[in-house]
Amino acid sequence: MNVLVSGGLGYIGSHTVVELVKRHHDVVVVDNLYNADADVQLRIEKITGKKLTTYIADCADAEAMEKIFSSHKVDCVIHFAGYKAVGESVRKPLMYYHNNLLSTLVLLEAMKKHNVHQMVFSSSATVYSPENTSPFREEMRLAATNPYGWTKLMIERILTDYATADPSFSAILLRYFNPIGAHDSGLLGERPVGIPNNLLPYICQVADGTREKLSVFGDDYATPDGTGVRDYLHVVDLALGHVAALEKMANRPGAHAFNLGTGKGTSVLELVHAFEQASHLTIPYVVTDRRPGDIDTVVADPSKAEKELEWKATHSIEEACASAWHFQQHVKDSL
């Protein structure tokens, strides 16, 4: 299949491109490098042994999208491109609404003009209302708590309405839980700019001495050890979920949502201890105040994806921690 991957040099996008190429799909990548590094293309090519067609362009640029769609036959779009930091979205809501919604609309207009009827969309567990209780199921109440989450929910609505208006259009909405880990090669992983927003990259930076200690936000949650519990999913499993969606569901009209998670919860301290086991290091941490809006437990019910996509997460938390540490050492050594 001919697949255009927007945001294909980012953390999740790059791992997905690797798995698509391994499955012999023809891939075109579009990325504006806002959340990615240009050398990721070379890293993907080193892993796959294949030359990658890449455009450094913004999906909100209609002229650039027209050029790309006119130059390539595209059967399906996997749409990762978008701003992705919850905290930043609260500080800069207009930037998030403008970028995430406009880039999607421009992409959809180009798809419509060039008769591309299939999209796999990178959504998020942040679309679920905090009033729900874990495990989260696809039919539960939707209501975001921050601008980032609202952009994901609004795009889901746009794709659902478009699929209703055009019976030939197929939209697969993949709601991620907490991606972690890296490619086994050590060439691909999460490289945050500045202070990491996510837990495992922060732990890795404490481990390599970049940061002094980890802040654990609250230890008085209604969980076994008092720290927040999340559903941590190896990024390679997540990438394979996109391949499964593409191959199993892309020809099915309508909009269809799927959770991608393990169905198992891991607390903050459990993840710290798993990393310590994998790295043979001790991670210093201090307990601080809760963050506003954080809830006790967020875990997926992945049974729909297991049934309809024939997909299931297979990597362990320990494997994810080991791969993340391997990548962190590789990146630090290459600087």
Image: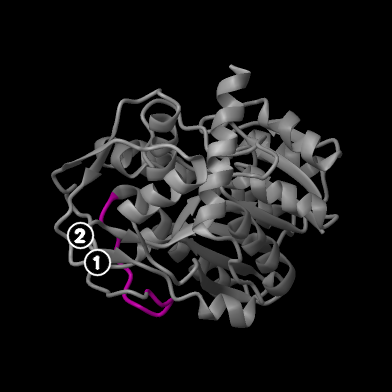
Q: Is any atom of residue 307 visible in this view?
A: yes
Image spot of residue 26 (x, y percent): 83, 50
Q: Quadrant of residue 283?
A: top left
Q: Which of 27 and 210 is in front in this view?
A: 210
Tell me the quadrant of the picture where the N terminus can be found.
bottom right
Query: Image height check: is 213 above or below 237?
Result: above
Could you say where residue 176 lies in the image, as x and y percent from the top left?
48, 60
Query: What's the amino acid at mark 1?
Result: Pro
Highlighted range, magenta: 136-146
Q: In this view of the protein, which residue sits in the foreground, 30 or 200?
A: 200
Q: Where does the image place residue 140, in percent across and percent down from the top left?
A: 35, 78
Side (left or right) of 107 relative to 226? right
Q: Mark 1 points at which residue?
A: 224
Q: Is residue 276 left or right of residue 305?
A: left
Q: What element carries label 1?
A: loop
Observer able to see residue 101: no
Q: How far apart are marks 2 and 1 (CA)?
A: 6 Å
Q: Name the residue under label 2.
A: 226
Instruction: Confirm whether the magenta stretch covers residue 139.
Output: yes
Horizontally, residue 233 falls left or right of residue 185, namely left
